[in-house]
Image (cartoon, helix red, strand yellow):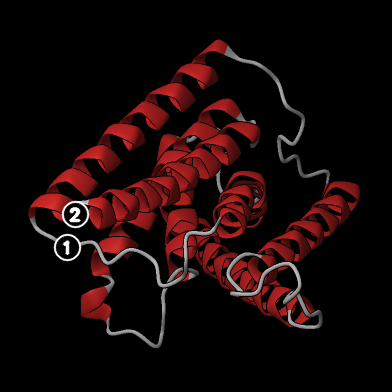
Amino acid sequence: MRKTIRAKYAMLIIVTAAILLLQESMDRIGWEAARIFDYSAIDSDGIFMTVSVHHAVIAGFSLLVMLLLYKTKRFTFGLKPKIERTAVKYTVAYCIFIFVYYILWYVIIGFLLNGVNGVDYALTGRNVIGTLGFQLLLSGPAEELLFRALPVACLRAVCTEGKKTDALLILFLTSLLFTAAHINWHVAASSQWYSLLYVFFNGIAYGFVYLKTKRIIYPMLMHSISNVISVSGCYLYMMLSSAA
């Protein structure tokens, strides 16, 4: 029995390391592919086209890997959208929470404590539409394919289906991988701990809904809407601050 448990956790470590390597590789390939093209005619400030192509590439590669795993291992990923009342409730509740969170964030941290720096590019119509379009259409779908659907399916192959402790372990590991992908190695850890904690708990929320519903569309919506609320809130805060 103990040997079986040890073998299981050894395999879990190997699979997690393989997922991390795959995610890092896809990320680098995405950036290399995105940097091939010149977007200056569309995106003169370089703030949304490169990252958009990067996310489109990682989404494409993620789908290719999923197709391969489906054909060879019969893995399922919950790609087919389906309206489910419980899933809709989870998604709406999360979006309301994030909306209230950012209102409090920009009021308290921004206006009262003056602790929000804003962005370092001009809020032109093109920049606003480009960045919000990226957040809405690409950030959630691409990242949820790579950091939720793909690793959850792979880890499920090692863990016991339906076992609560294994579900919690999958939730923790996928959120940890998601957080690791957001670490900025050029910035001191002390200055980014809060943002990484925020990413980790968002990963828990997205993963929880995915494990409950087995439909990746809901974490995609949660992720994209959260990002749109965050970025549009920052833009609104900057405009109100400059007008004050």
Expressed as whole percent of the image width and height from the top left, the position of residue 145 reads 67, 51
Residue at point 50%, 55% (across, down): 174
Earlier in the chain: of badge 1 and badge 2, it is: 2
In front here: 217 or 16? 217
Find disc 2 in the rendering and name its residue: 110
Location of residue 51 in the rendering, given as x and y in whole percent from the top left corner: 64, 67
Q: Is residue 51 left or right of residue 235?
A: right
Which picture quadrant has residue 229?
top left
Q: Secondary structure at mark 2?
A: helix
Q: In the drawing, does residue 98 fall left or right of residue 78? A: left
Residue 150 image position (x, y, % from top left): 67, 53
**Which residue is most to the bottom?**
186
Q: Write the residue at 83% across / 43% down.
A: 74
Question: Alpha carbon of mark 1 to alpha carbon of mark 2: how far?
Answer: 5 Å
* Most distant residue in the top direction: 85
The residue nearer to you, when weighing 60 against 122, is 122
- Give me the disc on residue 115: 1
Residue 215 lies left or right of residue 227; in this view the side is right
Give yes or no for contact between labels 1 and 2 (Cβ–Cβ under 8 Å).
yes
